[in-house]
Image (spheres, rainbow, N blue to C red):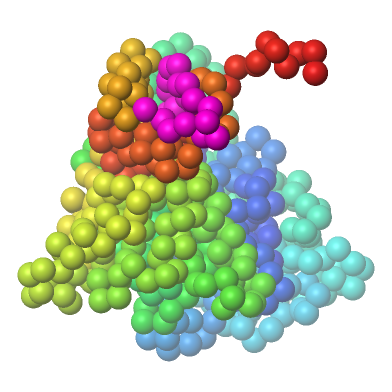
């Protein structure tokens, strides 16, 4: 039976390292600097034959509710409410601190099963410090090392003891009944990554889309660090939204932690199908926006451009027309990308944005038959044949689409290595217009046959 476990503790006790150990992947950012984790992150954990949802949380700090640390604590308290059991992590090397004792009371008031984990207990000194944890009144502490995976068998026993109704194996007849049922078709969620400069409103937009304060937001720039994936459903269609850290100019990225955050965001782009580039309506198409756009185009992802904070400029009647004109000039490699005005505060335009994402995904996955390709190519070659290079005629024989996601076409002929870049752009733009492929990168491969007279050379 499925259950949920939340990892709780003060900053820098190894919660994210434990989370990565239990999910078997390096999903959460880990650094020696305290306070790396800010948003809560869920993953599929496994210990032995137990499978469960594990939630990584921000380090608990005693701070006013309006501050960033206070809002992080509110996210952690929400995770406690959602969990069936709690893993309370302390640092065995440093022993108990006043913060551990203070937040042990918070965990105790939750009235849920608690597993006390004394992390960083690899050394003999750490194991000795573990005994001090008995003073918290949360049961026997488990000496553990998230870095080296020591103590997993004790954690397995503790989970079974804490949640016997969730960890008991199901009856054999139920298993047989499930095995006999035919597998139902599972709809694969559309993976959408939202990227942009810091403070563009990415987390606020996702909170508005899903209808809850799932992600940490605020006036401070650079709040988001981890790329958080959120499962959601829009009008009955499955979606997985990825929030990413704001991407600044490379020259301004100096700290190791920010480099890790940006790398995590780039990884989210690589695994997404549609990327929403979120612009600020008051300062759209900054140089950094175009740099992010270039990244999306190189990765070959479908693109939707969302212009946030539209409520601040809605009184300007010519703003949208000018944005569309600028996009045609600046987004030449993904010409026709949909421009959607949105407001993460009021919710304006969010349905249009999601519809644009599904439309972009359909274009990104589109296939054109070889017959259609060559019928179009013959017309193009009649009206505008390729130029001669160094007195040699370039001959294009035929074309086919070799794959989709994004659309990738192969051009076959002779002397294609001399084909000018301008003529390739002409062909790509013609394909985009003829087969309705707006807002998606188009790849073109040139394939030349072997020259039989070169074999003896």
The segment highlighted magenta reads: 385-411
Q: Is residue 421 left or right of residue 14?
A: left
Q: How many marks on residues?
A: 0
Q: Position of residue 3 (x, y in %)?
A: 50, 45
Q: Is residue 402 left or right of residue 261?
A: left
Q: Position of residue 365 (x, y in %)?
A: 37, 31
Question: Which residue is found at the position 90% from the left and 67% from the top?
Answer: 123
Question: Which residue is found at the position 52% from the left and 58% from the top?
Answer: 265
**Quadrant in which residue 434 is drawn:** top left
Q: Position of residue 86 (x, y in %)?
A: 55, 60
Residue furthest to the right in view is: 124
Magenta stretch: includes residue 391: yes
Q: Is residue 162 above or below residue 443?
A: below
Q: Is residue 231 above or below residue 220?
A: above
Q: Would you say residue 112 is visible in this rendering?
A: no
**Quadrant in which residue 103 is drawn:** bottom right
Q: Is residue 206 left or right of residue 249?
A: left
The residue nearer to you, when weighing 397 against 19, is 397
């Amino acid at each position: 039976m499925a259950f949920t476990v939340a990892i709780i503790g003060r900053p820098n006790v190894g919660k994210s390292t434990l989370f990565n150990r239990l999910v078997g992947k390096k999903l959460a950012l880990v650094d020696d600097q305290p306070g790396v984790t800010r948003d809560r992150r869920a993953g599929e954990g496994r210990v032995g034959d137990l499978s469960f949802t594990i939630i990584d949380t921000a380090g608990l700090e005693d701070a006013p509710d309006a501050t960033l640390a206070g809002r992080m604590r509110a996210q952690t308290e929400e995770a406690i409410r959602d969990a069936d059991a709690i893993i309370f992590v302390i640092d065995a090397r440093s022993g108990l601190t006043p913060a551990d004792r203070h937040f042990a009371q918070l965990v105790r008031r939750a009235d849920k099963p608690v597993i006390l984990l004394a992390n960083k207990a690899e050394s003999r000194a750490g194991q000795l410090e573990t005994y001090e944890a008995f003073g918290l009144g949360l049961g026997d502490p488990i000496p553990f090392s998230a870095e080296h995976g020591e103590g997993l068998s004790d954690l397995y026993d503790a989970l079974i003891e804490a949640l016997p109704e969730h960890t008991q194996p199901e009856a054999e007849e139920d298993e047989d009944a499930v095995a006999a049922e035919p597998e139902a078709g599972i709809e694969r969620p559309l993976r959408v990554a939202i990227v942009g400069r810091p403070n563009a409103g990415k987390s606020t937009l996702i909170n508005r889309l899903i209808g809850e304060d799932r992600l940490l937001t605020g006036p401070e720039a650079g709040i988001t660090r981890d790329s958080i994936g959120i499962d959601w459903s829009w009008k009955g269609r499955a979606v997985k939204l990825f929030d990413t850290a704001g991407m600044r100019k490379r020259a301004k990225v100096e700290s190791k932690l920010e480099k890790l955050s940006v790398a995590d965001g780039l990884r989210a782009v690589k695994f997404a199908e549609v990327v929403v580039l979120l612009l600020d309506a008051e300062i759209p198409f900054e140089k950094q926006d175009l740099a992010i756009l270039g990244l999306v185009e190189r990765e070959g992802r479908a693109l939707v451009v969302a212009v946030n904070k539209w409520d601040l400029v809605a009184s300007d009647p010519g703003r949208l027309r000018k944005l569309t004109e600028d996009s045609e000039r600046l987004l030449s490699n993904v010409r026709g990308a949909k421009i959607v005005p949105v407001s993460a505060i009021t919710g304006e335009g969010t349905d249009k944005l999601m519809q644009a994402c599904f439309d972009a995904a359909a274009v990104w996955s589109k296939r054109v038959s070889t017959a259609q390709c060559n019928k179009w190519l013959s017309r193009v070659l009649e009206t505008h044949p390729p130029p001669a290079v160094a007195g040699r005629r370039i001959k294009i024989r035929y074309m086919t689409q070799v794959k989709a996601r994004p659309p990738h076409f192969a051009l076959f002929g002779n002397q294609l290595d001399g084909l000018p870049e301008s003529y390739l752009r002409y062909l790509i733009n013609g394909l985009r217009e003829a087969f309705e492929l707006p807002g998606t990168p188009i790849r073109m491969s040139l394939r030349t046959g072997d020259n039989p007279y070169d074999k003896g050379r």
